[in-house]
Image (tube, rainbow, N blue to C red):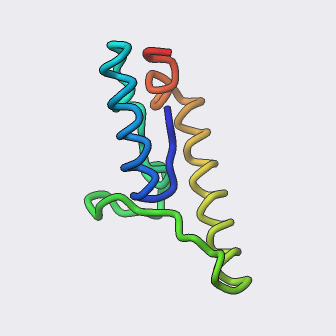
Amino acid sequence: MILVMDRSNYTSVRSLTAFQSLASGKRYLEKVRMFRDFDPAVTSGGGAAEVPDPYYGDMGDFEQVFEIVMRTSRNLLAELEGGNAASNVHENG
């Protein structure tokens, strides 16, 4: 599984994985996911949510991103431990 934080990274990584998929015959495109696909606070059907970049913000922006990352990481870990996402991790190397 390859997790990315925003749409720009998603597009870039999928471009690289498309090339690798063609060269190797492996299915890498399916491994690229938005990190917040695992965020329980994101409503389904609302499109791919990004992790906001707090760089030009204030301390509150950094705290918000910290909370997003912690919440999403906990949920991702629970899914991996429960086997829901495990096939994505081990499939095709």
- Residue 16 x, y percent position in the rendering: 41, 36
Taking depth in this image into account, of 26 and 83 the one nearest to the observer is 26
Taking depth in this image into account, of 36 and 54 the one nearest to the observer is 54
For the point 41% across and 47% down, the residue is: 12
For the point 57% across and 53% down, the residue is: 72
For the point 52% across and 37% down, the residue is: 79
- Residue 48 x, y percent position in the rendering: 35, 58
Outermost residue on the right side: it is: 59
User: How many numbered marks, from 0 up?
Assistant: 0
- Report whether 63 appears left or right of 27: right
- Residue 63 x, y percent position in the rendering: 70, 75
Taking depth in this image into account, of 67 and 78 the one nearest to the observer is 67
- Residue 30 x, y percent position in the rendering: 34, 31
36 up-or-down from 33: above or below: below
For the point 30% across and 20% down, the residue is: 22
87 up-or-down from 12: above or below: above
8 up-or-down from 54: above or below: above
19 up-or-down from 36: above or below: above
Quadrant of the rendered image containing residue 49: bottom left
